[in-house]
Each structure stands twice: as C-alpha cells, then as structure tokens.
C-alpha cells in the first residue's frame, strides 16, 4: 500500500474532496486525523473510515484560529506521536462574485480559511517534521490557482496564493526533507456542482464546455492522485502545481 503506517492530517474532511482523500488514504494504509467545523459531517466521515477498519481521530476545530490549530496538533501528536502528511484541503468561496460584489467580510473570511490557515497549520506541524528530517504537504489549490474565471475574485486570489506558498515552502525546506505539492483540481462532481448544473448556472455550464474530455472529475479521482503524491512513489515531485482537470485549463 502507498501509505502504509503513515499518519496523515486532512482538513475539511467532513465532506467532498476532504472526505474522499481521508477514505483513500486509509485504504492505502494510513492512519488519519480528520478535521472539520461541521461536526455532523465529520462524524459521518469517521464512521465511513471505521467501517473500513481504519484508524481515525476526528477533531472539530476552526483552522483559521491559531489556538484551534495548536489544540489539534497537540491531540494528533499525543495520539499518534507524529504527523507524516498534512493535507491542507479546507476552503471556502463566494460563488462567482467580481471584486466590486465581494464584501470586506467575505474577502477576509476567504483569505483566513484558504490562505492564513494553510500558513498557520504548516508552521505548527513543520518543526516536528524537520526534527524527523521528513514530511509532506499536499495543499489543495485549484485550477483557479493558475487561471481566472472558475470562482470569485477572492477565491482565485487565495488559490494563486496557495500555489505560490507551496513553491516557496519547497524552496526553503526541500534540503531538510520536506516536500510540498499544490494539487489543482478542475470541476469536480460534488452536490454543489450538481445543484449548479440543475440551476443552469452559466458559469458552471461554461466550465463544463471547456473540458475537452467532456468528463467532470470525481472526488475519488482527486483522492487517488493525492494519495500517490503523498507517497514515496512521488518523492521527486516537489514545489509544483499538479493539475487534475480533464484538460479544462488548456485554453
């Protein structure tokens, strides 16, 4: 198995991509710490993992708050003694709003969850990884971290920031055994996307039409790729953005 005996922390694991990655990591042999603010969703993820006889620790925490992150890492280290992989997955967005339509409160929320939380969580875990001389960060960005038009102004800005932060993280710490990869999914089949399709949202229809393969990605496909990138098989992949978008960002 790709992640045998590894310990992985995954944020935003109460649904969607976070849940899919948590399940796939367990299937590949990892023990997982799963985090979300949604207590109900997180409990569902824990149950799914336990049904697979997986080892899981669920922690409800607001990752935009330093004290919550410190609490989470303390619990993780007390339980497993280490964290080998950190998947910065949690994110929020404000639909497809242009700059003039986004309130300052929305902007701050998106930046706090999508960017600041990645910095805070990374810095809390990084010293432990440096002591071991080894550690991997999978930062879930988006093709919105490389192009425009697939989210609101704040979301696109935040995901570009995640890609840049990932590159700098690898630049600074690769020599110390740290890997950091920005995983950039395109349009993925989630309940939110299905609702937008049913509503005929032009922004989503345009994205679908931009996929040459005519295939909307599945969360499981992103999870497979994430598990591979987090594994020793991908040890020479570092400091880059890796797209999984069916060709959506070609043009």
Image (cartoon, helix red, strand yellow):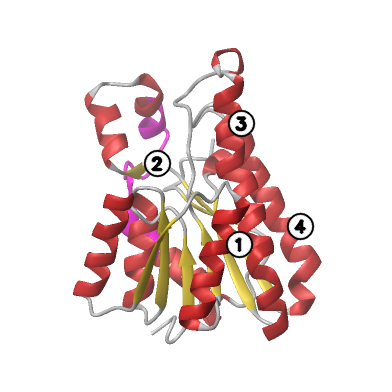
Which residue, given by chain and number where applicable, does mark 1 sit on? 181
> Could you say where residue 245 lies in the image, as x and y percent from the top left?
44, 48
Write down the quadrant of residue 136 in the picture: bottom right
In the image, what residue occupies the spot 50% across and 73% down?
A: 76
Residue 146: tell me if it is visible. Answer: no
Q: Secondary structure at mark 3?
A: helix
Q: How many marks?
A: 4
> Could you say where residue 13 lies in the image, as x and y percent from the top left?
38, 56
**Sequence-first tag of 3 and 2:** 3
Task: Give the CA separation, mark 1 to mark 2.
Answer: 19 Å
In this image, 11 relative to 205: left or right? right
- The residue mark sitting in front, 3 or 2, is 3
Q: In the picture shown, does residue 210 fall above or below 42?
A: above
Residue 108 numbered mark, or none: 3
Numbered range of the magenta stretch: 206-223
Q: In the picture shown, does residue 189 fall above or below 173?
A: above
Task: Give the CA separation, mark 4 to mark 3.
Answer: 23 Å
Write down the quadrant of residue 210 in the picture: top left
Dot 2, crowdedness within 10 Å: few (<14), some or many (≥20)? Answer: many
- The residue mark sitting in front, 4 or 3, is 3
Which residue, given by chain and number where applicable, does mark 2 sit on? 187
- The residue mark sitting in front, 3 or 1, is 3
Task: Give the CA separation, mark 3 to mark 1.
Answer: 25 Å
**Sequence-first tag of 4 and 1:** 4
In the image, what residue occupies the spot 58% across and 48% down?
A: 65
**Sequence-first tag of 1 and 2:** 1
- The residue mark sitting in front, 1 or 2, is 1
In this view, the residue in front, 128 or 151, is: 128
Which residue, given by chain and number where applicable, does mark 4 sit on? 168
> Could you say where residue 50 lies in the image, as x and y percent from the top left?
24, 73
In this image, 106 relative to 115: left or right? left
Q: Quadrant of the N terminus?
A: bottom left
């Amino acid at each position: 198995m790709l992640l045998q005996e590894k310990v992985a922390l995954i944020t935003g694991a109460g649904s969607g991509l976070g849940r899919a990655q948590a399940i796939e990591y367990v299937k590949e042999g990892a023990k997982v710490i799963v985090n979300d603010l949604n207590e109900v969703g997180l409990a569902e993820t824990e149950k799914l993992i336990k049904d697979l006889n997986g080892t899981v620790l669920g922690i409800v925490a607001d990752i935009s708050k330093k004290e919550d992150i410190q609490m989470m890492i303390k619990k993780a280290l007390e339980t497993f003694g280490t964290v080998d992989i950190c998947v910065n997955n949690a994110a929020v967005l404000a639909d497809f709003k242009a700059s003039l339509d986004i309130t300052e409160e929305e902007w701050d929320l998106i930046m706090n969850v999508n960017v600041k939380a990645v910095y805070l969580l990374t810095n809390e875990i990084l010293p432990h990884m440096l002591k071991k001389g080894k550690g991997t960060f999978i930062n879930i960005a988006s093709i919105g971290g490389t192009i425009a038009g697939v989210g609101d102004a704040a979301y696109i800005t935040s995901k570009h920031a995640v890609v840049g932060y990932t590159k700098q993280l690898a630049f600074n710490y690769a020599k110390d055994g740290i890997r950091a990869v920005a995983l950039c999914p395109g349009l993925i089949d989630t309940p939110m996307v299905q609702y937008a399709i049913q509503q005929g949202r032009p922004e989503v229809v345009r994205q679908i039409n931009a996929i040459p393969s005519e295939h909307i990605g599945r969360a499981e496909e992103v999870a497979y790729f994430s598990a591979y990138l987090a594994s020793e098989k991908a040890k020479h992949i570092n400091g880059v953005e890796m797209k999984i978008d069916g060709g959506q960002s070609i043009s």
